[in-house]
C-alpha cells in the first residue's frame, strides 16, 4: 500500500530493545526498500520537555491525555490570545478537524478527576530524557549526517503541533511535494440500472460525466478500454463491470470483481502503463519522547494522503521471527531436560532395585547360617549317607573279584605252557594294572573314611529348595 501512498514514520527508534537493539533498528531503516525522502527532526530543550511531560494529566474514565494548557483554564485563556495564525483561508480549512479535536468541553467534574500518570513524574521524565540522550541521540545524529541536508528539516518542539505543521507544510510545498493521487470509485447507485445494461460506448459516455471536477470536463477511457487491468496483469482477459468503475488521474478503469477493485484502490501502479505517477511521499519524523512526533506525523499523512507507520509495525516480522526462535529454543531445552530427568529417574530405579536384591540375598544368607536343623532330620540324613556308602562298597568289591578271577585263569594257562611270550607279557601287564587298581581302591576307601569323618564333624546345611519345601 505504501508503494503508492507513501508513508510517514514516527516512533523511531523504539526504546524497547526486546527484539531489536537501537543500532539494529536504525540499520533496518537504512536498508528500507523505500528510503525516506525527508527527515524531520524535532528539537526541544530538556527543561521545556520536562515541564511539558510532567504537566500532562489523564482522564481515568475516557483515557484522554491533556496538556497543561488544556486542563489549566487560566493559562489556556492567555494562550488563546497569543495564538498566531499562519497562511491563508485554505490552510485554516485544512486543519479545522484538528482544531475541533483540541477544543475540549472540560467541566469541573472532569478537571477534578484528572490524575497524573507514574511515567509523568519528574524523576521518570528525567530518566527517559537521559536514556534518549545517552542511547539514541548519538546514533540518530550519525544517521542524519549521512542524509541530504536539503531534505533535513529541523523544527522547534516548543511550538504547538498546528504551528509546526503549517511551517513544515510551506517548506514541503516549496520543495515540490504534492498529495498522492488517489483512485476514486465512479459508481453511483442511482444510475446503476441505466449504465449496467449499456454497451461499451454508452457505458464510457455515462461514466465520463460522473464526478466532474470542472464544468464540461469529462474523464477519458484508459488504454485497456473495458478490460479489467488487474485480470490483464494476471494473463486473463475479463470484461469489467460498471459498478466497479474507478477514476484515477484523468482516466477511467473498469474492474471485474470486488477483489480486483480493492487491489486497484490499494496500489494502482502495477496495473498502469507508462508514464507512472510521481513517486509517493516518504517522511521520517524524529525527536525526543513526548515532543509531538506522532501528532505531527498524522497531520502530514492527512495532508498528503500517506500512511502512518510506527516502528512496531516495521519490526513486526522480526518480532514474529524472534518469537518462533524463542519457542523453538524453549521446546529444545524442555526436551533435553526431560530426557535427562527420565534417564536419572531410570538409573535411580535400577540402583534401588539392585540394592533391594542385595539386601534380600544378605537376609537369606543370614537365615541359612542361623538355621537349626532338628535331631530327627539329622539321623535320617546319616542313614541315607550310610546306605549310599554300602552300595558303593559292594560295587567296588564285585569289580575286584572279577579282576582276580581273570588273573588266576591267565596264570593257569601260563603254567601249562599254552601261552606265547607275547601273551605272557600281556598277562603281566594286566596283573600290574590289577595291583595298581587294588592300591587305588584302598587309598580311595581311606579317603572316603576321612571325608565321612569330616562330614560327621561338620553340621549339615540343607539347600534352599529343601528349606522352602
Image (spheres, rainbow, N blue to C red):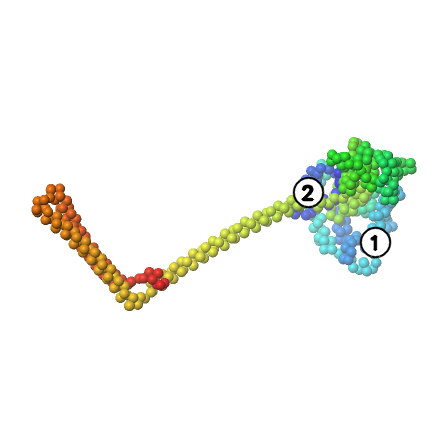
Q: Which residue is mark 2?
A: 25
Q: Which residue is mark 1?
A: 104
Give the quarter of the figure containing the C terminus.
bottom left
Residue 231 on image: x %, y %: 76, 36
Would residue 469 appear left or right of 295 to someone viewing this image? Answer: left
Residue ID at (85%, 47%):
96
Residue 113 on image: x %, y %: 78, 59
How far is the residue under mark 1 from the one under mark 2?
37 Å
Residue 317 on image: x %, y %: 68, 43
Examine the rendered structure and indicate whether residue 397 appears above or below residue 138: below
Examine the rendered structure and indicate whether residue 406 appears above or below residue 222: below
Examine the rendered structure and indicate whether residue 251 appears above or below residue 360: above
Residue ID at (85%, 50%):
100
Give the quarter of the figure containing the N terminus.
top right
Q: Which residue is more in the foreground, 170 or 391?
A: 391
Residue 323 on image: x %, y %: 64, 47
Q: How many circles with numbers are drawn on the protein?
A: 2
Q: Which residue is more in the foreground, 246 or 35?
A: 246
Figure quadrant of residue 375: bottom left
Figure quadrant of residue 154: top right
Residue ID at (71%, 53%):
124
Q: Earlier in the sequence, mark 1 or mark 2?
A: 2
- Classify mark 1: helix, strand or loop: loop
Residue that lies at the very extreme toward the right in this rendered image: 215
- Classify mark 2: helix, strand or loop: helix
Would residue 215 appear left or right of 303 to someone viewing this image? Answer: right
The reply to whether residue 79 is visible in this rendering is no
The reply to whether residue 381 is visible in this rendering is yes
Amino acid at each position: 500500500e505504501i508503494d503508492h501512498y507513501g508513508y510517514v514514520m514516527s516512533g523511531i527508534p523504539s526504546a524497547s530493545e526486546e527484539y531489536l537493539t537501537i543500532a539494529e533498528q536504525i540499520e533496518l531503516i537504512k536498508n528500507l526498500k523505500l528510503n525516506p525522502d525527508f527527515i524531520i527532526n524535532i528539537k526541544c530543550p530538556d527543561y521545556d520537555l520536562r515541564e511539558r511531560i510532567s504537566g500532562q494529566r489523564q482522564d481515568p474514565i475516557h483515557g484522554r491525555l491533556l496538556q497543561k494548557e488544556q486542563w489549566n483554564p487560566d493559562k489556556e485563556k492567555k494562550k488563546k490570545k497569543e495564538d498566531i495564525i499562519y497562511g491563508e483561508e485554505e490552510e485554516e480549512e485544512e486543519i479545522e478537524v484538528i482544531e475541533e479535536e483540541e477544543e475540549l468541553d472540560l467541566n469541573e467534574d472532569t478537571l477534578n478527576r484528572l490524575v497524573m500518570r507514574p511515567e509523568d513524574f519528574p524523576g521518570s521524565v528525567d530518566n527517559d530524557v537521559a536514556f534518549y540522550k545517552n542511547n539514541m541521540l548519538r546514533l540518530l545524529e550519525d544517521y542524519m549526517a549521512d542524509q541530504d541536508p536539503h531534505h533535513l528539516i529541523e523544527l522547534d518542539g516548543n511550538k504547538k503541533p498546528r504551528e509546526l505543521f503549517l511551517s513544515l507544510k510551506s517548506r514541503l510545498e516549496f520543495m515540490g511535494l504534492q498529495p498522492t493521487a488517489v483512485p476514486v470509485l465512479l459508481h453511483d447507485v442511482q444510475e446503476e440500472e441505466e449504465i449496467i445494461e449499456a454497451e461499451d460506448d454508452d457505458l464510457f459516455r455515462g461514466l465520463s460525466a460522473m464526478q466532474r471536477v470542472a464544468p464540461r470536463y469529462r474523464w477519458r477511457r484508459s488504454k485497456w478500454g473495458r478490460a479489467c487491468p488487474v485480470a490483464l496483469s494476471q494473463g486473463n482477459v475479463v470484461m469489467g463491470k460498471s459498478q466497479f468503475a474507478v477514476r484515477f488521474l484523468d482516466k477511467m478503469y473498469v474492474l471485474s470483481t470486488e477483489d480486483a477493485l480493492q487491489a486497484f484502490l490499494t496500489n494502482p501502479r502495477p496495473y498502469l502503463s507508462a508514464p507512472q505517477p510521481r513517486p509517493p511521499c516518504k517522511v521520517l519524523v524524529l525527536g525526543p519522547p513526548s515532543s509531538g512526533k506522532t501528532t505531527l506525523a498524522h497531520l502530514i499523512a492527512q495532508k498528503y494522503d500517506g500512511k502512518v507507520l510506527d516502528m512496531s509495525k516495521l519490526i513486526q516480522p522480526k518480532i514474529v521471527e524472534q518469537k518462533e526462535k524463542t519457542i523453538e529454543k524453549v521446546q529444545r531445552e524442555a526436551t533435553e531436560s526431560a530426557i535427562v530427568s527420565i534417564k536419572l529417574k531410570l538409573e535411580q530405579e535400577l540402583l534401588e532395585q539392585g540394592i533391594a536384591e542385595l539386601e534380600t540375598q544378605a537376609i537369606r544368607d543370614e537365615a541359612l547360617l542361623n538355621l537349626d536343623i532338628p535331631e530327627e532330620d539329622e539321623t535320617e540324613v546319616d542313614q541315607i549317607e550310610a546306605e549310599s556308602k554300602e552300595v558303593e562298597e559292594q560295587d567296588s568289591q564285585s569289580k575286584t573279584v572279577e579282576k582276580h578271577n581273570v588273573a588266576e585263569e591267565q596264570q593257569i594257562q601260563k603254567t601249562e605252557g599254552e601261552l606265547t611270550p607275547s601273551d605272557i607279557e600281556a598277562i603281566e601287564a594286566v596283573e600290574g594294572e590289577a595291583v595298581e587298581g587294588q592300591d587305588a581302591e584302598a587309598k580311595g576307601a581311606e579317603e572316603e573314611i576321612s571325608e565321612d569323618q569330616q562330614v560327621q564333624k561338620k553340621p549339615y546345611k540343607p539347600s534352599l529348595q529343601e528349606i522352602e519345601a
